[in-house]
Image (cartoon, rainbow, N blue to C red):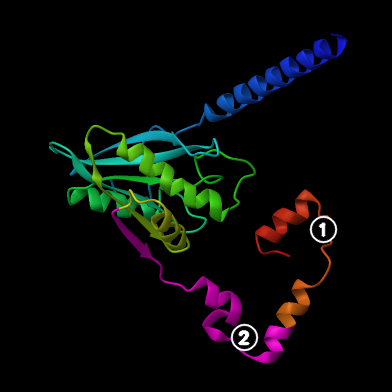
Amino acid sequence: MKLMTILTAGLLAFNMTGFAQNDRTMKFQEEHLNLTAGWDKVFPQSNKVTHSKITFHNRYGITLAADLYIPKNAEGKLPAIAVSGPFGAVKEQASGLYAQTLAEHGFLTIAFDPSFTGESGGQPRSVASPDINTEDFSAAMDYLATRDDVDAERIGILGICGFGGFSINAAAMDTRVKATVASTMYDICRGTANGYFDANDNADARYEMRRQLSQPYRPVRQSRKDTVRQDCGIL
């Protein structure tokens, strides 16, 4: 009887811990984002589309920020496209221009900041994950497919530069993606292996790369002043 009491107490404690973890997850999904209210793009605003800010979540619990572009005077359910990239860029740049231009041609579009980037959530900042960034595109599909003004059978994704690969990954797994564009002007895999313009496409250069990659990691400690000087090109 005493053993059963102990086991019951343990199970209750385990369940309560699970509830607490779920509660923390839900709070994380409700992460508050500081979205800029005004027009903050590097390109002019079109008078042919309406623009607004929206948010949605991916399955990792990260809140993503996006710009929504809708053709003016649009009626019925529209074909839709989710746009992101280039690698390291934000939606106020190329992806936003792509999205706005496509909206001028009749598509409902979103340009989103991937996880850990721009106005989107996620920690640490300014990092990338093939798994999570691929999921970002599927999360954009979730958002678009549930809008009343979107035709769920006509949704595509567009990945620019480094995000072209993530868009192809998403399309390979997500059957809801009906069209995919990878607007990739640079072969990152080839550049990594052979160097810029194949400058390191020789045995000595490949050996030197392997030698450097084999070195033990030694973190370099710098003062904040030296880090700023290095970022500015002084060091």
Residue 224 to residue 61: above or below: below
Quadrant position of the N terminus in the picture: top right
Task: Please name the residue that numbered disc 1 is placed on.
Answer: 219
> Which x, y percent locates residue 228?
70, 54
Q: Is residue 99 left or right of residue 78?
A: right
The magenta-colored residue range is 178-207
- Neighbours of disc 2 within 10 Å: few (<14), some (14-19), many (20+): some
* Residue type at the position of mark 2: Asn
Asked whether residue 80 is in view, the answer is: yes
**Residue to which mark 2 is pinned:** 200
Is-magenta flag for residue 189? yes
Look at the image and say whether residue 44 sits in the magenta stretch: no
| Amino acid on which disc 1 is placed | Pro
- Of the image marks 1 and 2, the number of the one nearer the N terminus: 2
Residue drawn at (42%, 54%) of the image = 173
* Label 1 crowd (10 A; few <14 / some 14-19 / many >=20): few
Q: In this view, does 175 lie above or below 217?
A: above
SS for dot 1: loop
Give the total number of marks visible in the rendering.
2
Between the C-alphas of marks 1 and 2, the distance is 27 Å
Where residue 235 sits in the image (x, y, percent)?
73, 65
Image coordinates of residue 40 in percent, x first then y, are 39, 42
Q: Which residue lies furthest to the bottom in this view?
A: 203
